[in-house]
Every structure is written in structure tokens, then in C-alpha cells.
Amino acid sequence: MTEVQPAPVQALVPEVGDLAPDFELLNQYGEPVRLSDYRGQNVVLVFYPFAFSGICTGELCEIRDNIAAFKNSNAAVLGISVDSKFAQRAYAEHERLGFDLLADFWPHGAVARNYGVFDAVSGMALRGTFIIDASGVIRYVVVNPRGQARDFAGYRQALSDLVEQ
């Protein structure tokens, strides 16, 4: 007889107005990056499924090509996937990404789970974006289903709204 396992509990996605869950992950160089160290600066968390995948590459390269919009809004970009720091480094070098890529590798997807964007069935992060203000409060949230790229115009509008506050 085959035992049926209960469905994994999906954490709730933090909402606009919530304090962003703090975390510490290694970047592509093996350096620890803690979200709370960015207090005083806006942060854009970009969860993506996997390095070197098509839609993810398009999205992250669009950020790379428009990084001035983030810098002009005093926003640091942190890309996060369940890939290892080694895969993150190869990916960042290959695509010439000038921002940190964080390895949510072990415990597998722990940060993505805390943000409610971990797909336990496929073992990857969903396409979730959280824009966090300088006080650590979430000001923008979007989570897209598998296979659907995020709209870059949403970033621009959310960043513009932050600057106006």
C-alpha cells in the first residue's frame, strides 16, 4: 500500500505594509548578505526559478540594462534562487549582472518559503518581486505564475512611488 503524503503547507505571501522577513544568504562570491543590513536603502528582491533559464535570463538582463532606474531610486537589487553560489557566480559572470545573486540553496528554498514563493512540488522559487523601503516595509509585491515574465513597467512605477514618499 502506498502512503499518501499531505500536501505541503504554503506560507502566505507577505503583503504591502508588512515588515519584510529578514534573512541571511550567501551571494555568488560566498559572502553573507543580510537584508537588515540594507536599512536606510530601498531593496528590490527578485525571486526567480533557476539560473540560465530563458525567462529568468530575460528578466534579470532587463534589470541589468536598466539598473540606473534602481540606483536613481536608492534601491539595491538582490536576485534570489535555489541555485548554489557556484551556479549563481557562473550565471552572474556569463550575463554580466552587476548585482548580487543570492543562493537560497540550503536549507533548500527557506527564504523563498518565508516569502510564500517556494513551489514545493517543483523545488523552485516562483517569480516573486518584493520592493522594500528604507525602513524594511514591503511597498510592492507581485508573484507571477510559472512561465509568465514580470512586467518591467511595474518596477518603474513602484520605484517612482517610493521616491515620491
Image: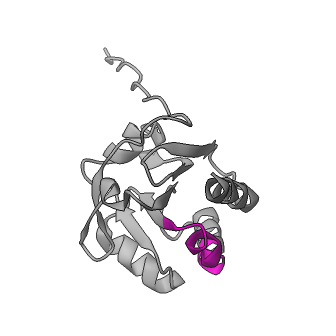
Q: Is residue 46 visible?
A: yes
Q: How many circles with numbers are drawn on the protein? A: 0
| Start-end of magenta stretch | 63-76
The picture places residue 161, in percent across and down from the top left corner, at 68, 53
Left or right of residue 60: residue 153: right
Asked if the magenta segment contains residue 68, the reply would be yes
Asked if the magenta segment contains residue 159, the reply would be no
Quarter holding the N terminus is top left
Q: Residue furthest top?
A: 1
At 44% from the left edge and 85% from the top edge, which residue is drawn?
A: 93
The picture places residue 51, in percent across and down from the top left corner, at 47, 67
The picture places residue 125, in percent across and down from the top left corner, at 47, 48
Q: Is residue 105 visible?
A: no
Q: Quadrant of residue 156?
A: bottom right
The picture places residue 107, in percent across and down from the top left corner, at 25, 47
Choose between 32 and 54: the one closer to the eye.
Answer: 32
Q: Quadrant of residue 54?
A: bottom right
The answer to whether 40 is drawn above or below residue 101 in the figure is above
At 59% from the left edge and 69% from the top edge, which residue is drawn?
A: 70
Model colouring:
one colour
The answer to whether 118 is drawn above or below residue 78 in the figure is above
The answer to whether 67 is drawn above or below residue 48 in the figure is below
At 30% from the left edge and 60% from the top edge, which residue is drawn?
A: 37
At 45% from the left edge and 77% from the top edge, which residue is drawn?
A: 91
Q: Residue furthest front?
A: 165
Choose between 145 and 37: the one closer to the eye.
Answer: 37
